[in-house]
Image (cartoon, helix red, strand yellow):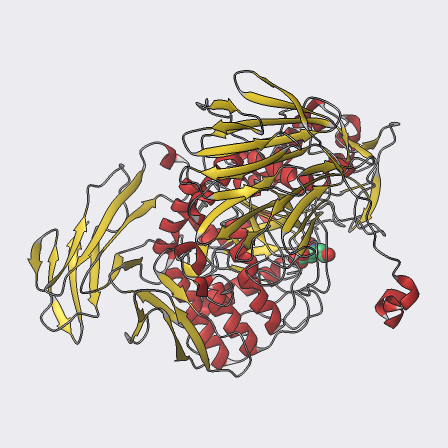
Amino acid sequence: MLEDTSFAIHPGNNPNLSETPYQDIGNIKHVEKDEERYTFYCENGYVTVTFNRADIIRIVMNPTDVPSLKSTPAVITQPETVHKELREDNEAYVISTSHLDAYIQKAPFRVRIQDKEGHTIASEQEKGLGFQENGEVICYKDMQEQDRFYGFGEKTGFLDKRGESYTMWNSDVFAPHNPETDPLYQSIPYFMSLRDGRAHGIFFDNSYKSTFDMKTETDHYSFRAEGGQLDYYVFIGPSPKDVIEQYTHITGRMPLPPKWSIGYHQSRYSYQSEQEVREVANTFIEKDIPIDVLYLDIHYMNEYRVFTFDKDQFPTPEKMIQDLKNAGIRVVPIVDPGVKKDPEYSIYQEGVREDHFCKYLEGDMYTGDVWPGESAFPDFTDERTRKWWGEKHQYYTDLGIEGIWNDMNEPAVFNETKTMDTNVMHKNDGDPQTHRALHNLYGLMMGEATYEGMKEQLGGKRSFLLTRAGYAGVQRYASVWTGDNRSFWEHLQMALPMCMNLGISGVAFSGPDVGGFAHDTNGELLTRWTQVGAFTPYFRNHSALDTARQEPWQFGEKYEAIIRDYIQLRYQWLPQLYSLFREAHETGVPVMRPLMLEYPHDEKTYQLYDEFMIGDNTLIAPIMHPEVTDRAVYFPEGTWVDYFTGEEYSGKQTHLIHAELDKLPIFIKKGSFVALSPVRQSTMNKQDSLILHVYANDEGEYKTMFYDDDGETYQYEGEESLKLPITISSTSAEVNIAFGEKQGRFNPSYQHVDVYVHSLQDNQAITLNGEKVTGERSGQSVHFQAKL
Ligand code: MIG
């Protein structure tokens, strides 16, 4: 193809990219206010300013009408009643809440938001809000030299997005996921900006194709969309974690995942028969490699008809699923949105008869080619269709299935545009709009249909959903894997900032295909990737048709042994991870964090993409290059202890760390602890004990909440959970471990805690809730048991 050759850069190809300038919203003529909002009547349109909370301001511009406050389905929280005041002088209006002041300049309309200490959070000067005849809307904001940008959902590249420009348009991109490949599957039109250690966020709630440009100009950035209103929220921080709390306050947080879904997952495109599935399962068990989930990719279906099994290759799916479950393994099948156009296929018949498929305005049904051939697409923007689709999942739950994998839900279609015609209509719960307007919502709404359907069918048990496409708010329904990466070291490297930015964007439960999807992996890459996977929130090994097999044992014993160790390590860390998932569920703050999130005043962390944190005290610095066994590791403030060797490193500096192939560099901050468990083959096996590893310091206090529950029902929403505040206080004379008051009624399977205190100084004593304990001492560590 011509665009793949040098012809692509032919000098005659590139006409001057002059852009028609945007029409400015103009001067304010007058303001009208009612209880909840202020509407500014401007020369060229209208702007509404309103508040969801005292720290969340929403601004909506509409060039032709008084703005509507209807949101996309991303927003689920009703605005609170916010106490606010309006002042006016010759130049400006000032709207104040307890948390912010918004200066609204009159001529022309410009907004500057400040915190109560007078720091500018977001501002506009030369350019502000604008639009074009063709319906495009834009917002410009000032940018200072020190400003950093994070978030934007699932994007390639490094951690800080300054100097980049991104488009939001859910796309099926098989190849090649280069740093310049954009857009990908998810659209999360949201970012966080960091200036001098203080953060704020902006969510541009517009489902049209949108673009964020932090690249073209040096003193301002912009975001714009092809149509719709300019509707955005500013979250005023001031800490990065505050911003995430604010953003997820309006777009929602992840439900607690079933525990089995945070274990190890094995997939392949495809395990093609019952026998093959059983063999893979048995091999894991024989080899003592823990596993909780096996996937069925598209080959399980009868000619790719969703809600069917191929009776030749899978004659007894129910038995297979039951047998695997008895062995501790759940089966998760893929479900694509395309429904095969086949008048003898009941799902298609029902869909047509009951009017569930997307249609053109004139009434013809839209069809497009996907795996099953010509297919129709359910209109998930319609409540009635979401319900129908959800109910269909009884087919799977009746077979014992508790998790679903949604793929191709951008939606992907095999044609030039790669998706549905943009003039197809969606019912949109009574407010019909084109696919052009709602494209980015398709995956989110399919997620809602599937999640709610599974929840209903499972009658009280938690389900697991994995999705490829989504929009802001996708975290409420699904975990996200980052699509078709490749078995390249570069793709392992890229997975870190991608998942960290997804985490900043509200999606705490994400991960890449471990080992790489396309291309052939090798033993070393798979080993290093599995080490990383052991600490990404979602942990699945998956690979494509016609590529080298990449189950843990495919490259010989040397690699198999190390891979086993790290999958087992994942199972040891499950209690710690689960407590962190609880935090994500309650506050939105992700499990996997860039160091910047914990140390926003440390500039060295701002672009640090090849290290990450698990929670607030564990630093992971993987090796991500072939045959490399040493790497530079930057440590933020504090002293850090090597999890494997106990060696200590002082912070605010970079150290050279040695790590042979069998070592993933993991460091715990002195003065804190992690909560682990013995290795299990599956989360279905009983957890016998809880193990606390405490790292003694000589000063300071560390406080956190240990959390547990049954891991499989929603009873945690009542009282069936265990919250245990744990505080570690260190002085040079003693380390005290304090278990605070337990909350909740959940009774875990373990009744005692094995406590190991490491990094002790010779004369340092240990106390438990203030009482001296002796315990067995070996070297710098002491072990004792405590009652829970
Ligand atoms: O375009 O179902 O990203 O994980 O194995 C291929 C087959 C369709 C794309 C997914 C991939 C999956 C594959 N699917």
In which quadrant of the rendered view does residue 100 lie? Answer: top left
Image quadrant containing the N terminus: bottom right
Relative depth, front residue between 78 and 283? 78
Residue depicted at 36% across the width and 37% down the height: 716
Which of these two is toward me, 291 or 337?
337
Position of 472 relative to 360 (above/below)? below
Residue 263: image location, x then y, percent:
45, 56
Whole-percent x, y for residue 310 in the image = 70, 51
- Nearest to the observer: residue 207 or residue 550: 207
Kindly give the residue lying farthest to the top in the view shown: 34
Query: What is the total number of numbered labels drawn onto the structure image?
Result: 0
Task: Quadrant for residue 666, please give it.
Answer: bottom left
Task: Measuring from the top left, give residue 188's x and y in whole percent.
Answer: 61, 45
State whether residue 213 is above or below residue 433. Answer: below
- Side (left or right) of 318 relative to 672: right
Q: Is residue 256 above or below residue 497?
A: above
Identify the residue at image location x=60%, y=50%. 152
Which of 143 and 313 lies nearest the eye of the viewer? 143
Residue 225 can be seen, yes or no: yes
Q: Residue 208, position in %: x, y? A: 72, 39
Could you tell me which residue is drawn at 31 percent across and 62 percent down?
678
Q: Quadrant of ligand 1?
A: bottom right
Residue 275 located left or right of residue 693: right
**Residue 299 seen by the camera:** no
Residue 195 located left or right of residue 474: left
**Is 90 rendered above or below residue 568?**
above
In the image as oriented, which residue stretches furthest toward the right?
12
> Of all residues shown, which one is farthest toward the front?
90
